[in-house]
Amino acid sequence: MIQEILHNGNLTLFLLGLGALTIGSASDIKTREVPDWVSYGLIISAAAARTMAAVQYGSWSILTEGLLGFIVFVLIAYLMFYTGQWGGGDAKLLMGLGMVIGLKPEISTALTSDLTGFLVNVLLVGSVYGLLWSIYLALTHWKKFRTEWKANIQRYRKWRAAALAAGIALLAAAAALNDFLMKLFLAMISIFAVSGYYVFIFIKAVEKSCMFKKLSPDKLTEGDWIAEDVVVGKKKITGPDDLGISREQIKELKKLASEGKIDRVLVKEGIPFVPSFLIAYILQFTTGSILNILHAF
């Protein structure tokens, strides 16, 4: 849909998405949250822009495509939020992008649509972005990271033995084959088996040493991920199962803090992922899906 919008000389939808992602990225990096007005504003303004375009061109498919894209991304956003992969701000922003990009109702074009291409870009760019951000965290918290890395190597030493054994077995199997492609395939799996173990250790070490901090209740914001149960007396106030603390819970924690019943709360600080949305969006607009680029080679 993005290419069609540009072809028609109408940049409104693209610029709405670009503006929301730029503001959201800056806010996510600075405060680890995306203001609701950015997400809801994108949804409403994109719907309004599509409605006006539908009236102008006499084609209601412009609006229905936006609604279909919105519905698809709502489902994906809820899945990512309730599995703890994204925060509420990320999920809401994705919904708005669904309205911006849109999706044609034809099943035959679904896999090659801009919506699918953008989603693929988000997954691929997000993986690289997340790894680079994790490396940055490890370097800026080097002493804590190194200690946790060594502890994890010992903690998961049986996993390392299993990964090495699997890697060696796969290489031996590859050496016994004559088919070059099968040799290459097994060799790659062998590399992934061993490197996957160390990536797992790295991520666990970064998470434990760099992504947890204790905050007083007055420093909490709605949607923060509470890392451990907060129990006063026999009453549980909040915890990891809440998928983000609510305003009511923050208010109650502030009251308990004023009474001297709690001091600070352990919070898990996630990686600001909205910038990866921005990169994926620009890529989809300029070059299309990353998979299409790789396929061309």
Image: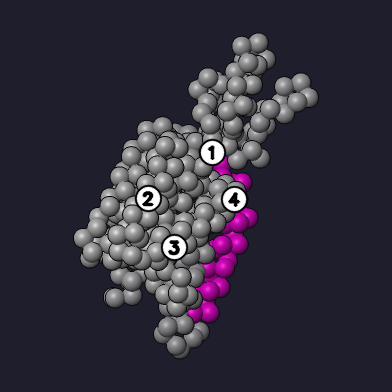
Q: Earlier in the sequence, mark 3 or mark 4?
A: 3
Question: Which is in the foreground here, disc 1 or disc 3?
Answer: 3
Q: Label 2 vs label 4: CA separation?
A: 31 Å
Judging by the rendered image, the residue that carries numbered circle 3 is: 64
Question: Which is in the foreground here, disc 2 or disc 1?
Answer: 2
Does residue 129 appear in the picture of this structure? no
Asked which secondary structure carries label 1, the reply is: helix
Left or right, residue 85 beside residue 37: right
Judging by the rendered image, the residue that carries numbered circle 2 is: 48
Asked which secondary structure carries label 4, the reply is: loop
Name the kind of residue labelled 3 in the image: Thr
Q: Earlier in the sequence, mark 1 or mark 3?
A: 3
Q: Residue at x 54, y 63 (%)?
A: 164
Q: Position of residue 53 (x, y in %)?
A: 32, 58
Q: Position of residue 42 (x, y in %)?
A: 39, 46
Q: Where is residue 117 in the image (x, y as percent from the top left)?
A: 38, 65
Asked which secondary structure carries label 3, the reply is: helix
Name the kind of residue labelled 1 in the image: Lys
Q: Which residue is drawn at 41% across and 85% down?
A: 180
- Proximity of marks 1 and 4: CB atoms separated by less than 8 Å: no
**The N terminus is located in which quarter?**
bottom left
Q: Is the magenta stretch mostly helix, strand or loop?
A: helix
Name the kind of residue labelled 4 in the image: Thr
Number of marks in picture? 4
Question: Which is in the foreground here, disc 3 or disc 4?
Answer: 3
Q: Label 3 vs label 4: CA separation?
A: 29 Å
Left or right, residue 237 beside residue 266: right
Bounds of the magenta span?
A: 146-175
